[in-house]
Amino acid sequence: MQISLDDLGFAYGRKTALHEVKWVIDAGVTGLLGPNGAGKTTLLSVLIGLLRPKSGTVTIRDAEGGAVVSPRFGFVPQRFSLAGEMRVADTVSYTAWINGVPRRECAAAAEQALRAVALADKADVRVRSLSGGQRQRLGLAAGIAHDPEVLVLDEPTAGLDPGQRLRVREVIDGIGRTRTVLLSTHLLEDVEHLCQRVGVLVNGRIVFTGTVEELAAVMDEGSARAGLGSRFERGYDTLIDTLGDFE
Ligand SMILES: Nc1ncnc2c1ncn2[C@@H]1O[C@H](COP(=O)(O)OP(=O)(O)OP(=O)(O)O)[C@@H](O)[C@H]1O
């Protein structure tokens, strides 16, 4: 599936959060980078239809270029609440049902999704006993159990330790081989290791789209700058300075 955003605008009252965003997102894994408050969550919410755009359109096309009116979206928000008393498998099964999977197929869909996120061994435990990383993977399982054609993830690796982050990346990478995945992140490492393409949003405007190699070339211009932090952090800082008037 290919997603076209055409002149997408959105405002919270008088505060404009998206300014005529134009972006074509192809199949595979695409990253959305941007500083706090850039409008990433707003963009994802408009894309999946949670928020109605003030202007512009979102068009989804299949591999043959035909418009798809109601694609199956999977969405894993930045923060989500889970019922601690529920068992892991029931949680995923329930979300699958909410997302339109016929009742008698929900258990099998949940089992498959839990296997995909390497949580099958936790199927019968209660949600409250999971670690933060396991909860994140449970959120992913709930987001993919109805076999979405387009998967949208808001900071899927935030707050995870390096091992859990790797595991979540592996899951997303696997899904992205046959689906369209868009994920927002603050972590350049996510983009470097996971995404084929990337967009950078600053102050509600898309200021860069391209491959990860093209992004790295922009970042490398500033990576010699002395300072505290990793090469990635310095590169990111320079990137935002170069590409947008960061408030
Ligand atoms: N419900 C709301 N009401 C008013 N303003 C909002 C609301 N939600 C977001 N905003 C504002 O819209 C802008 C974009 O917010 P958004 O949450 O989309 O950014 P973000 O890039 O996802 O940020 P972060 O990286 O911190 O999650 C910000 O200035 C924010 O303060």
Image (cartoon, grey):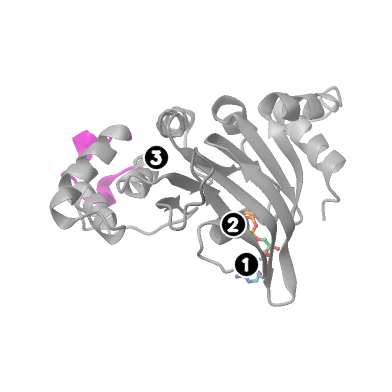
Task: Give x and y (percent) for residue 100.
Answer: 28, 58
Task: Give x and y (percent) for residue 37.
Answer: 69, 57
Is the CB of the residue bearing disc 2 within 8 angstroms of ligand 1?
Answer: no
Disc number at residue 133? Answer: 3
**Residue type of the residue flagged with mark 3:** Gly
The question of residue 132 being in magenta is answered with yes
Quickly name the residue at label 1: 53
Front position in the image: 119 or 44 = 44
Q: Tell me where the magenta segment starts and ends, as one range.
A: 117-133
Secondary structure type for disc 3: helix
Disc number at residue 58? Answer: 2
Secondary structure type for disc 2: strand
Q: CA distance from mark 2 to mark 1?
A: 9 Å
Q: Residue at x 74, y 27 (%)?
A: 214
Please give left or right for residue 152 compared with residue 105 in the image: right
**Residue type of the residue flagged with mark 1:** Pro
| Of the two numbered discs 2 and 1 in the rendering, the one whose residue sits closer to the viewer | 2
| Of the two numbered discs 3 and 1 in the rendering, the one whose residue sits closer to the viewer | 1
Quadrant of the rendered structure where residue 198 is? top right
Q: Residue at x 53, y 50 (%)?
A: 60
Q: CA distance from mark 3 to mark 2?
A: 32 Å
Q: Residue furthest left?
A: 104
Ligand 1 placement by image quarter: bottom right
Q: CA distance from mark 3 to mark 1?
A: 33 Å
**Residue type of the residue flagged with mark 2:** Val
Front position in the image: 120 or 146 = 146
The question of residue 119 being in magenta is answered with yes
